[in-house]
Amino acid sequence: KSSSKYSLVEYEEKTIDSRDKDAENENVSNLARSHTHSRSSTQLRNILNALLPPIKVASDGYKQVSVAKPTRGSVVQLQTAWDEQLQLRAARSSGICAIREELNQQAFNEIIRQITIE
């Protein structure tokens, strides 16, 4: 869907295998019962995956959005990256612009990720 591989949304470095994804879903209830902390992180992961589904990056590989807690610096970095991408990709300053629309969607998705984690 995206015309560029660059994304304003922060993703985990680790790529998960589609088989790992299925196994992870099967083990959710066992992990939740064993550790209260694990349950909250598992619930957060499930919520994030529902809001911002993992993206396919290889034949069997997927990347999930990051669960890293946002900082003030990450918000400033998001604004800086958004501005840079608008200029690099020559987005129109007025009127309908597919580039601006795509970058705005990515920025809103990153904000949703950050608010969900908070």
Image: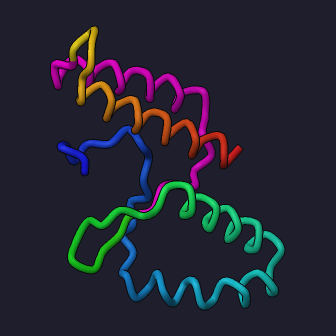
| Helix, strand or loop for the magenta stretch, by majority | helix
Q: Is residue 106 left or right of residue 40?
A: left
Q: Is residue 118 left or right of residue 50?
A: right
Residue situated furthest top in the rendering: 94
Q: Nearer the viewer, residue 15 or 111?
A: 111
Q: Is residue 79 left or right of residue 44?
A: left
Check the image and report above or below for 98 versus 84. below
Corner quadrant of residue 88: top left
Check the image and report above or below for 91 versus 58. above
Percent position of residue 62, x then y: 35, 70
Corner quadrant of residue 37: bottom right
Residue 48 covered by magenta stretch: no
Q: Is residue 22 left or right of residue 69?
A: left
Q: Nearer the viewer, residue 2 or 95?
A: 95
Percent position of residue 23, x then y: 51, 90
Q: Residue at x 58, y 58 (%)?
A: 48
Q: Which residues are magenta?
A: 64-91
Q: Which quadrant of the rendered structure holds the C terminus? A: top right
Residue 83 covered by magenta stretch: yes
Q: Residue at x 17, y 25 (%)?
A: 89
Percent position of residue 112, x then y: 58, 41
Corner quadrant of residue 14: bottom left
Percent position of residue 78, x then y: 44, 29
Check the image and report above or below for 42 versus 106. below
Q: Residue at x 38, y 60 (%)?
A: 13
